[in-house]
């Protein structure tokens, strides 16, 4: 795991902890699961929120900037 990936997971877990009022361990677990399933998560979000006029290609999208 690179330091950039670690930073992404930590930032996401802090956000989850703040927004959901979870304990630190649970927030880290949630962030790690989201990070590991990033490709599935992006596909589901695109499918859920797209409209007929505005179709996005899930292969070009990411949750985290590289």
Image (cartoon, rainbow, N blue to C red):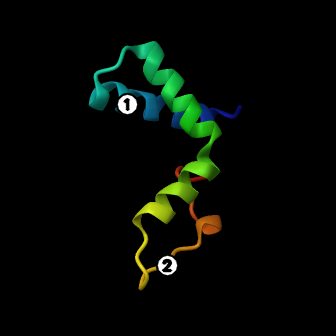
Place residue 60 in its image quadrant: bottom right
Number of marks drawn: 2
* Residue visible at 55% across and 49% down in the picture: 41
The numbered mark, 2 or 1, whose residue comes first in the sequence reads 1
Left or right position of 5 against 56? right
Q: Name the mark on residue 45.
A: none
Q: Residue at x 69, y 34 (%)?
A: 2
Q: SS class of the residue under badge 2?
A: loop
Q: Residue 33, percent across and down?
A: 58, 32
Considering only vertical position in the picture, is 29 above or below 42? above
Give the position of the N terminus as an image quadrant.
top right
Place of residue 7 in the rendered image (x, y in percent of width and height, measured from the top left): 54, 33
* Residue for point 30% across, 28% down: 20
Point out the residue furthest to the bottom here: 53
Q: Is residue 2 left or right of residue 51?
A: right
The residue singled out by tag 2 in the image is 55
For label 1, the SS is: helix
Which residue occupies the extreme right position in the image?
1
CB-based contact (under 8 Å), mark 2 and mark 1: no
Mark 2 and mark 1: span between their CA atoms? Answer: 28 Å
Q: Is residue 21 left or right of residue 56?
A: left
Crowd rating for badge 1 (residues with CA inside 10 Å; few <14, some 14–19, many 20+)? some
Residue 16's label in the rendered image is 1
Instruction: Say which residue appears at 45% left-offset and 35% top-offset.
Output: 12
| Location of residue 14 by image quarter | top left
Query: Is residue 53 positioned above or below 58 on the image?
Result: below
| Residue 61 horizontal/vertical position (percent) | 57, 63
Residue 39, given in percent of the width and then of the height, sits at 63, 52
Q: Foreground mark, 2 or 1?
A: 2
Query: In this picture, is 53 found above or below 37?
Result: below
Query: Are there few (<14), some (14-19), or many (20+) residues within 10 Å of tag 2?
Result: few
């Amino acid at each position: 795991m690179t330091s950039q990936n670690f930073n992404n997971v930590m930032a996401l877990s802090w956000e989850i902890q703040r927004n959901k009022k979870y304990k630190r361990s649970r927030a880290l677990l949630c962030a790690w699961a989201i990070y590991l399933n990033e490709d599935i998560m992006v596909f589901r979000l695109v499918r859920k929120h797209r409209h007929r006029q505005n179709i996005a290609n899930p292969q070009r999208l990411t949750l985290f900037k590289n």
